[in-house]
Image (cartoon, rainbow, N blue to C red):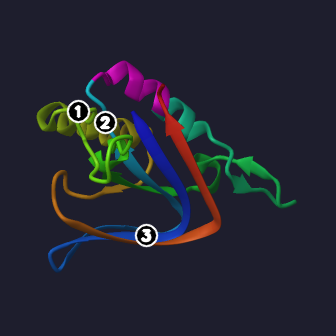
Amino acid sequence: MRFVVQVCKNASVVVGDKTVGAIDKGCTVLVGIGEEDTEEIADKMLKKLLALRIYPDENGKTNLSLADIGGSLLIISQFTLYADIRHGNRPSFTSAGNPDKAKALYGYIIDKCTEQGFNVQCGIFGAEMHLTLTNEGPFTIVMDSD
């Protein structure tokens, strides 16, 4: 499982001409789900994500978590995080999870974050989406379950 975590001032996702998710201060999380991923792996990734101290305190040190600042999450499914470009110039996505499994795990991730009291917005699994965000810092972290 792979997460690209971006600290943002605001973010939104549009499908067609409709905004389907938008947040103010928080994180945009691009989620890639691999063929070997499970709910247990998702739980470990979420535990780490939600505990990350990536927001500045009153002294400018990164000591605060998403919960500490009352931040929101915009969670976007992105199978292209499993692109393999080792051979040739056209990416292969054979390591990405099959769509049914990936959709179920994506829903699981959203549900777990919501259960923990976070304002969670999301894209639409499998849709062509347009993501806009104002990255703060910029502060971006790549998390990989491997």
Residue bearing the label numbered 2: 33
Per the image, label 1 sits on a secondary structure element best described as loop
Task: Tell which of 12 and 100 is nearer to you.
Answer: 100
Q: Position of residue 17 (x, y in %)?
A: 17, 80
Task: Tell which of 23 and 15 is nearer to you.
Answer: 15
Left or right, residue 90 beside residue 1: left
Question: Dots 2 and 1: beta carbons under 8 Å?
Answer: yes
Quarter holding residue 2: top left
Task: Estimate the spatial distance between the alpha carbons at disc 2 and disc 1, rounded to whole Å.
Answer: 6 Å
Left or right, residue 135 beside residue 77: right
Residue bearing the label numbered 1: 97
Q: Position of residue 136 (x, y in %)?
A: 62, 68
Residue 37 painted magenta = yes
Per the image, label 3 sits on a secondary structure element best described as strand
Overall secondary structure of the magenta section: helix
At label 2, counting other C-alpha atoms closer than 10 Å, the crowd grade (few under 14, some 14-19, many 20 or more) is many
Give the residues in magenta.
36-45
Residue at image position (34%, 37%) is 109
